[in-house]
Image: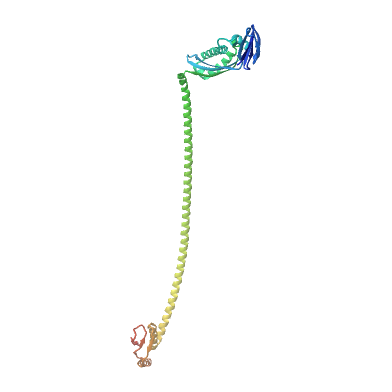
Amino acid sequence: MSIIKRYPFIRHFQGTPTHFVVHLDRGKARHSGAGAAFWFFPSTSVLSELPVYDQELLATFHAITADHQDVTCQIAVAYRVVDPVGAAVRYDFGIFPMPTTPPQGGEQLSAVIGQLAQTVVLGEVAAMSLEQVTRAGAPTIQAALLEGLGGDGRLAESGVAIVSVNVLGVRPNPEVERALQTPLREELQSAADSALYARRALAVERERAIAENELATKIELARQRQQLVDQEGANARREAEETAAAQLIAQRAQAERTEIDTAARAAQIREVGAAEAAAAEAMMKAQAAAGPEIMRALAMRELAGHLPGIGALTITPDLVTNLLAALGGGRPFAAGLTAAGAGSGAGDHKPPRAEG
C-alpha cells in the first residue's frame, strides 16, 4: 500500500512495486511507474494507483442449450493491466484527492470482463445441445473465451490483457445430470459385470483344467497300477510254472531213483532169497544125510540159543549118567538141573527137562 506524507504546502508519495501510480498535474502526466516516489502539490495534482500483478476473476453463469436445457458454467479468467495510463483514464483508481468512497476501478474492470465472458459463454452454449455441452463443451467454451476476450477492443483500449482462461466445469441441473449419468453408469456396471463373468469363467476354466490334469494323473496311475498287477501276475505265473516244472523234474528224478532202488532191492531180495533157498536146500540135504545124533545136537544148540541166561548150573550124577547113557545107547534122558538167578525168585530151583 502506498504512503502519502503531508507537509506544509506540499506532499510526498511513496509507492509499492506491485502498484503502478499515475501523477497528473493540471491534466498532464508528471510521474508514472511502479514503486515511484515523488513530491507533488496537492492543489494541482491527481493521483491514480493501479495493481499491475496478475488478477483472477471467478465467475459462474447459467446458460440455456439449443435443446432448452439449463447448464451451469464456471470459469476462471486471469488478466493483467498492461497500460496503466489508459486504464487510469477509463476506470476509477484515484487515491488523491481522497475520494468519499473507495476506488471502484477494480470492481468496474472485473464487471466488464465478467460481462464479456458471460456473453461469450451464453452464445457458445446456445449453439450446442445438452449432449454436446456435457461431452465437449468445456474445450469449446474455453477456446471461444480466449478468442472473444483476447480480441475485444474495449479491453484492448483499456490496457487490459487476458493471461489465461480456464473452464472449471459445465454441468446441467442435478436431475438431468443423474439421468445423463445413468447410461454411463449402466455401461460401467455392465463392463464390471462382464469383467466379473470373465474372471469367473477364467476361474472355472482353470478349475476344469486342474480337474482334467488330476483325472489324467489318476488314469495314468491306474494304468501303471494295472501294468504292475499284470506284470506281477505274469511273474507269479511264470514262477509257479517254473516251480511246477522243477517239482515235476524232482518227482521224476525221485521216481526214477525209487524205481532204481526198488529194482536194486528186488534183485537183492531175489539174490538173498536164492542164496537162502540154496542154503536151506543144502541144509536140508545135509540134515537128510546126517544121523539122529547130529540132529539132536543141532536141536540142543538151537534150544540153548533160546534159553534164558543161567547164573549157576548144578550137575547131578543122575544127569551125567543119563547123558552118558543117551550118548552111548541112543535113548532119551531126563535129569534135574538146579539153576539160580535165571529170572526166578530166590531159592526157586526147577531142573530143566530135555527130551531127545
Q: How is the image coloured?
A: rainbow
Q: Position of residue 308 (x, y in %)?
A: 37, 83
Report the front residue among 214 and 107: 107
At a point 48% along the width and 29% down the height, the residue shown is 192
Which quadrant, please, contains the C terminus? Answer: bottom left
At a point 47% along the width and 56% down the height, the residue shown is 239
Q: Position of residue 208 (x, y in %)?
A: 47, 38
> How many numbered badges does the structure rendering display?
0
Q: Position of residue 132 (x, y in %)?
A: 51, 17
Which quadrant, please, contains the N terminus? Answer: top right
Q: Position of residue 286 (x, y in %)?
A: 41, 84
Give the quarter of the image for residue 141: top right
Q: Is residue 158 visible?
A: no
Report the front residue among 257 and 87: 87
Report the front residue among 54 and 286: 54
Q: Is residue 177 visible?
A: yes
Residue that sits furthest to the top in the current view:
26
Report the front residue among 329 and 304: 304
From what the image shows, is residue 119 above or below residue 314?
A: above
